[in-house]
Image (cartoon, rainbow, N blue to C red):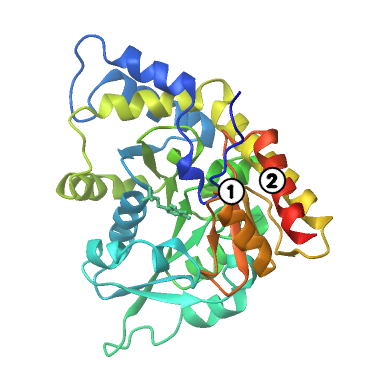
Amino acid sequence: MTLPARIFSSDNTAGASPEIVEAVSRAAAGQAQPYGADDLTAGVRHRLGEVFEREVDVLLVSSGTAANALSLAALTPPWGSVLCHRDSHINNDECGAPEFYTAGAKLVPLGGEDAKIDPGELRAAVRHKAGDVHSVEPSVVSLTQATETGAVYTPDEIGTLGSLAEEAGLRLHMDGARFAGAVAALGRTPAELTWRAGVDLLSFGATKNGTMTADAIVVFDRSLTPELSFRAKRAGQLAAKTRFHAAQVDAYLTDGLWLRNAAHANGMAARLQDGLKALPEVGLLGVADANIVFCRLPRQVTEGLLGEGYVFYHDRWEPGVARFVTSFATTEADVDGLLAAVRRYAG
Ligand SMILES: Cc1ncc(COP(=O)(O)O)c(C=O)c1O
């Protein structure tokens, strides 16, 4: 009998979808052109063109941090600024990679509920000291979809931020580490959630949702592709055996696997959220549209869970606040096991 999983710290703790592992194994046979000149890589570009209902360029990379930092570097000069949410991954969790790859652009953190950028704050920030050589030049807005707290931006919300950026001459980047989760939660098309709302470059996450080592940059403004290609090579992000990245993303996009996986992860978070809602001792924080649940836990619950071997972030954002993340591999038994443990210590 397999015991319920006890690691809820991140969706990165899941393995990979069997379809993806099999695709990598198939791709290992025979010869293929290196550095992305292979047929599988061309196929991924075609598939992503279908997903986004237009021609796109694609750069396959090995991490979300690489996708974000390279994208931002292509969208801002070194003297520019990146307007982002203060809770964003680029601002808190990338070890200065955006600053490094942009050769020194400044990240300007903004507020907003549920880790979504507040349009009022953005309206002021896009023109703040623009043209003043003593300050950095507002250059790009970066938003995260789904957000770091598991909320999602609607197409209208993205369009509002996109218009504010465009009117002031800024570009728009989307950190889509959990883009699939947002598409699955909203039931809106990938096109509506990106380029139709003004997004120039998308970090298309896949490793949190089924692939092994492959994420992608999806390029809507294709004039950026040559620069991005040089930057990716210079950053060591042009793999000689890109075919293995391509095999993963190809399988990820085949027969809707990416959306099935994301819908499952979201469903498990919803199950967890519903279970926690029934416990008066636990205070849910925000709404988990996607696969991240934040809540306030009594101290004895946190300690009890830790004592049973549960792994999750706690007391990191605020004392008493915990975060649980589900994935495509989380089972109902895993969630029910966690809920039973919470009940044991809450009671
Ligand atoms: C919102 C968001 N963006 C980007 C990343 C970066 O991904 P990686 O750890 O693969 O560099 C993460 C990873 O946790 C994330 O949560």
Residue 102, relative to residue 213: is it above or below? below
Along the viewing direction, whichever of 286 and 242 lies nearer the viewer: 286
Ligand 1 within 8 Å of disc 2? The answer is: no
The residue located at (83%, 64%) in the rendering is 280
Callout 1 crowding tier (Cα within 10 Å): few <14, some 14–19, many ≥20: many
Q: Which residue is mark 2?
A: 186
Q: Nearer the viewer, mark 2 or mark 1?
A: 2
Residue of label 1 = 193
Q: Mark 2 touching mark 1, by CB under 8 A? A: yes
First in sequence: mark 2 vs mark 1: 2
Q: Is residue 324 visible?
A: yes
Residue visible at 21% across and 34% down?
Answer: 239
Residue at 70% from the left image edge and 64% from the top image edge: 286
Q: Residues within 10 Å of mark 2 (few under 14, many from 20)?
A: some
Q: Amino acid at mark 2?
A: Leu
- Vertical placement of 2 versus 112: above or below? above
Looking at the rendered structure, the secondary structure element under dot 1 is loop
80 lies above or below 26: below
241 horizontally vs 46: left or right: left
Q: Nearer the viewer, residue 197 or 112?
A: 112
Q: Position of residue 137 (x, y in %)?
A: 34, 78
Q: Quadrant of the C terminus?
A: bottom right
- Of the pair 47 and 16, the residue shown nearer to us: 16
Q: How many marks?
A: 2
As drawn, which residue projects farthest toward the top?
30
Amino acid, disc 1: Leu
